[in-house]
Amino acid sequence: MKVRNRLVWISAALLTATLTTRCDPGSTGGDMQQPPVVETLSVTDALPKQMKNSGGTTITLTGTGFQTGATVTIAGVPAQDVTVISSTTIQCKSPLKVATCGQVPIVVTNPDGKSADRADLISFLTNGLQYSVPTSVMMGTFPRQVLAVDMNKDGKVDLVSANSGNANQSVVFRIGGGDGTFMTANALTAGSSTYGVAVADFNKDGNLDVATVNSASNDISVRLATGAAVFGTSTTYGSGADPRAIAAGDVNGV
């Protein structure tokens, strides 16, 4: 009887040991935790591509690795209403950036301090045409037409006007300084009541010549240049009655 009880006890112990040491068929001997995959932070696109610099335009940024709490700067100014929709999409609103035009940089910075930037995705446009305080430039009496042209071939824009109020100032030109300023006025005589002026190289010597149309004297005055913005005597050609405008061009293609 004692032998039987001992055998039962040994069998139970062996069964218990077998159950406690049994492994799950799918187990590898221990669950190894793999480190999470960290996406590289990048900015790949932005829409729209152009916006006014007055701010408030909704921008959608796409890329990788965006984290909740990321911040965005555009042209160095924090964007407004930044929302991280996913690790690949951010929406925000452009900031006010007066006097900034052309392509501007975008910088996305995650809470962990990592950042990514692009400077070729969006451009700011001016909110409207802006001009400085006007500066008066005196030309002749009763100017009827003004041309902006490089009279002396120095690469700077000069001004030429046709004036109907004074025959001694039928044509007035001012050489430009290249910075929006103009030198002392030079006057040329022409016919009576000059209404229009044309500037072109009429004799193909490389210098720009001047022609005017004269309303009261019903003629055209031509002055050939002898140098850069230096003119010889006037030659007169007849025209129709009361001419008011003149243009220069190669009419016969020769």
Image (tube, rainbow, N blue to C red):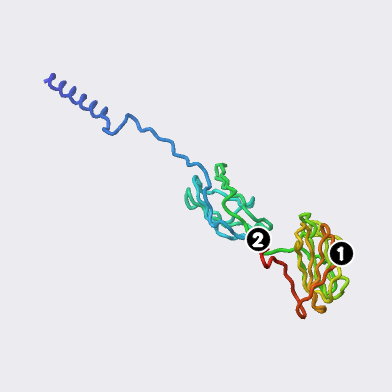
Report the side of 19 relative to 46 (left or right). left
What kind of element bears circle 2?
A: loop
Nearest the eye: 250 or 128: 250
Say which quarter of the image contains residue 6. Answer: top left
The residue tagged 2 is 126
Residue designated by label 1: 186
Mark 1 vs mark 2: which is more N-terminal?
2
> Could you tell me which residue is drawn at 81 percent across and 74 percent down?
194
> Residue 213 — which label?
none
Q: Position of residue 2 (x, y in %)?
A: 13, 19
Q: Nearer the viewer, residue 81 or 167?
A: 167
Residue projecting furthest to the front:
254
Q: Percent x, y for residue 40?
A: 50, 41
Residue type, numbered disc 2: Thr
Binning the other alpha carbons within 10 Å of mark 1 as few (below 14), some (14 to 19) or many (20 upward) gives some
Query: Is 95 left, or right, of 62 in this rendering?
Result: right
| Residue 218 percent across, percent down from the top left | 80, 78
Residue 155 sits in quarter: bottom right
Q: Measuring 81% from the left and 63% from the top, which residue is drawn there? A: 224
* Relative to 170, residue 121 above or below: above
Lateral position of residue 231 relative to residue 63, left or right: right
**Residue 60 image offset from top left, x and y in percent:** 52, 55
Measure the alpha-carbon separation of dots 1 and 2: 38 Å
